[in-house]
Image (spheres, rainbow, N blue to C red):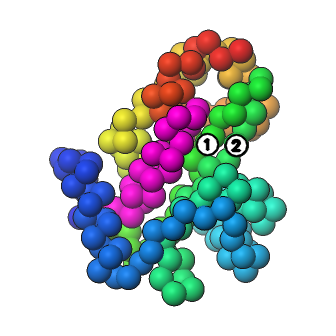
Amino acid sequence: MDTTLHMDINTVIEQAELYCDEQDIEIKLVYKLSNKTLEIISERSKELNTLYYVDVEMLRKRSENGCFILKKNDRIYGHIFVHEHLVKGHSVFERTSLWVDRDCRSYNLGLLLMARMTELFSDFFLISVAQTPKVHHYNEMLGMTHVRLSNMSAVLVEELEKLGKLRDEFSFRYYVNECFKSEIGQLK
């Protein structure tokens, strides 16, 4: 199940959920994590070049927005957070800190986590700043739209730069949900 290029998204998500059921892995939406868990996730973000480093306090703040975790007993097999940015009085939520345990990466659990978070924030401005082709594909499967900087309002581009989120468009892509897409050029 490593490739999802030609599969229906609902089927892929159902198979990921079935894998979790078979393995007794819980999919939980939480708004608070223990200090020990936050420290583990923070340390992981420091060690892995695929994640941006996030300190414990930042993770604690992000978890207050909602965090999906994959957990069996006390072991975490995956997580995804959202980070709230304020852009001229508008809350913009960025999906961030997606990670799945190496032992489970062939079962589309990353897509499952992304889908859950995307659904949770469907009525809010949600953005994904992604570098890997697999995440680009998942974003497209989830109905998110690739948006170039030239399609964003000048105010949003300026705010992305202030936040350190202005990225090279050759290496990174911006994806937004339907709610955000309708406003992205006018956000002031």
In the displayed image of the protein, which residue is found farthest to the left?
6
Q: Toward which corner of the image does residue 146 lie, by quadrant?
A: top left
Q: Is residue 124 above or below residue 106?
A: above
Q: Amino acid at mark 1?
A: Glu
Q: Quadrant of the C terminus?
A: top right
On screen, residue 105 versus residue 156, left or right, reads: left
* Residue 84 image label: 2
Label placed on residue 94? 1
Disc 2 packing (10 Å; few <14; some 14–19; many ≥20): some
Residue drawn at the location 37% of the way across and 35% of the way down: 143
Measuring from the top left, give residue 91's x and y in whole percent.
69, 34
Residue 42, x across and y down, in percent: 71, 68
Is-magenta flag for residue 129?
no
Residues drawn in magenta: 108-128
Look at the numbered discs 1 and 2 and tell me whether their residues touch, using CB distance below 8 Å.
yes
The quadrant holding residue 104 is bottom left
Which percent across, then down, holds residue 130?
52, 43
Q: Name the amino acid, label 2.
A: Glu
Query: To which quarter of the image does residue 26 belong?
Result: bottom left
The front one of 116 and 157 is: 116
Q: Is residue 145 above or below residue 66?
A: above
Mark positioned earlier in the residue sequence (1 or 2) = 2
Q: Quadrant of the N terminus?
A: bottom left
